[in-house]
Image: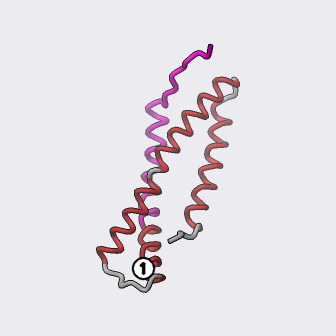
Amino acid sequence: MPVWREIDLSHEEEFNEEQKARREYATLMKVCVDDAKRILEEKGMPEYQSDVVNIALTLFRKRASHVTYLKDNKCRDKFVSMLRGAPVKQQVAKTQHKEQAVKQKIAVKPIAV
């Protein structure tokens, strides 16, 4: 029978993940505004400010929810490292590499409309 172990991020780890997300929010919102303008332009619709903002907010909320994924991923890495006995630092490096790849995909991935 498996043994249940609660995996929590330390306050510092959680704070670091939140700070990382906050640093990216401004850039992400600018990308979302640009994407919203492009969507309206591609569809031949007028770029009313309220429409751009509404579309951008929708895109932003979806993309920003990725923060929860990052925190969950961090917990998963801690759990896996506990099982394997591997140092957490090795797992963190792998997670950071994955996060960078995801950021690059978000920045250049065209939006399907």
- By secondary structure, the bulk of the magenta-drawn segment is best described as helix
Tell me the SS state at disc 1.
helix
- In this view of the protein, which residue sits in the foreground, 91 or 66? 66
Whether residue 21 appears in magenta in the rendering, the answer is yes
Residue shown at the point (59%, 30%) measured from the top left:
78
Residue shown at the point (48%, 43%) measured from the top left:
17
Q: Which image quarter: residue 77?
A: top right
- In this view of the protein, which residue sits in the foreground, 47 or 89? 47
| Residue furthest top in the image | 1
Q: Which image quarter: residue 105?
A: bottom right
How far across and how far down the image is residue 59, in percent?
43, 63
Whether residue 22 appears in magenta in the rendering, the answer is yes
Rendered position, 78 above or below 29: above
Tell me the kind of residue under disc 1.
Leu
The quarter of the rendered structure image containing the N terminus is top right
Q: Is residue 60 left or right of residue 75?
A: left
Q: Which image quarter: residue 61?
A: bottom left
| Number of marks | 1
Residue shown at the point (31%, 80%) measured from the top left:
48
Rendered position, 33 above or below 43: above
- In this view of the protein, which residue sits in the foreground, 40 or 78? 40
Colour mode? Answer: secondary structure
> Range of the magenta residues?
1-29
* Residue at mark 1: 40
How far across and how far down the image is residue 20, in percent?
48, 49
Residue shown at the point (48%, 82%) measured from the top left:
42
How far across and how far down the image is residue 36, in percent?
43, 73
Would you call the spot at circle 1 few (<14 residues within 10 Å), some (14-19), or many (20 or more)?
Answer: some
How far across and how far down the image is residue 46, in percent?
36, 85
| Residue furthest left in the image | 50
